[in-house]
Image (cartoon, rainbow, N blue to C red):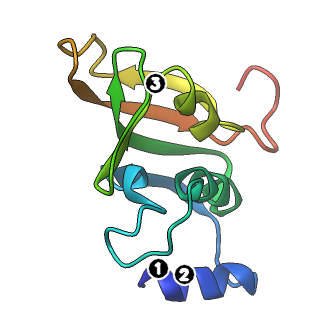
Amino acid sequence: MVPKEFTEKFLNNKIQQFDFGVTFSSLEHDGLGRYGDVINPIGDLQSMAKLLSVIKPGGLMFVAVPTGDGYDGLVWNAHRIYGKQRLPKLFAGWKLIDVIGQGSPPKGKFKQHLWVLQNPNGCKVGN
């Protein structure tokens, strides 16, 4: 299924929820126009919010995005680098379960952590 088909089905409530999802090195490109998408400064945030609707309550989302050593950045129109400001916005609504590949990148560089998130919607407290 290509993104256009997914969006069409999503808007028409024809997408069944998934147990888990995986996105590796893709969200940081959303909305930058590099791959023919519409320029949208919050395209990455909208994509993560949309995923809350298609991952089952309690389901997991595995996300790898470039993170800086506390700084946020944009390499136009290649990708974003997530730091103290944008990373919490990207994960809004999700529960952080684990981070794989922890550690700080060299100064001025970024690292690609794997974030394990859970859709807390419909979950019991403590799950």
Secondary-structure class at tag 2: helix
Tag 3: amino acid: Gly
Q: Is residue 39 above or below residue 48?
A: below
* Element type at mark 3: loop
How far apart in space, not on screen, are marks 1 and 2 (Cα)?
5 Å
Q: Give the x, y percent position of residue 109.
A: 20, 23
36 with respect to 18 (left or right): left
Image: 124 above or below 76: above
Amino acid under disc 2: Phe
Query: Observer-nearest residue: 21 or 90?
Result: 90
Mark 2 crowdedness (10 Å alpha carbons): few <14, some 14-19, many ≥20 = few
Total labels: the figure holds 3
Left or right: 68 in relation to 86: left
Residue 65 quadrant: top left
Give the CA separation, mark 2 to mark 3.
Answer: 29 Å
In the rendered image, residue 43, in percent from the top left (x then y), is placed at 56, 59
Nearest the eye: 43 or 62? 43
Which kind of residue does numbered mark 1 sit on?
Pro
Q: Residues within 10 Å of mark 1 (few under 14, many from 20)?
A: few
Q: Residue at x 42, y 42 (%)?
A: 63
Residue 6's disc is: 2
Asked if residue 12 is positioned above or below residue 64 in the image, the reply reads below
**Could you give the CA–CA distance between mark 1 and mark 3, rounded to whole angstroms?**
27 Å
At x 81%, y 24%, the residue is 125
Check disc 3 and report the residue beneath it. 83
Which residue is disc 1 drawn over? Answer: 3
Label 1–label 2 contact, CB within 8 A? yes
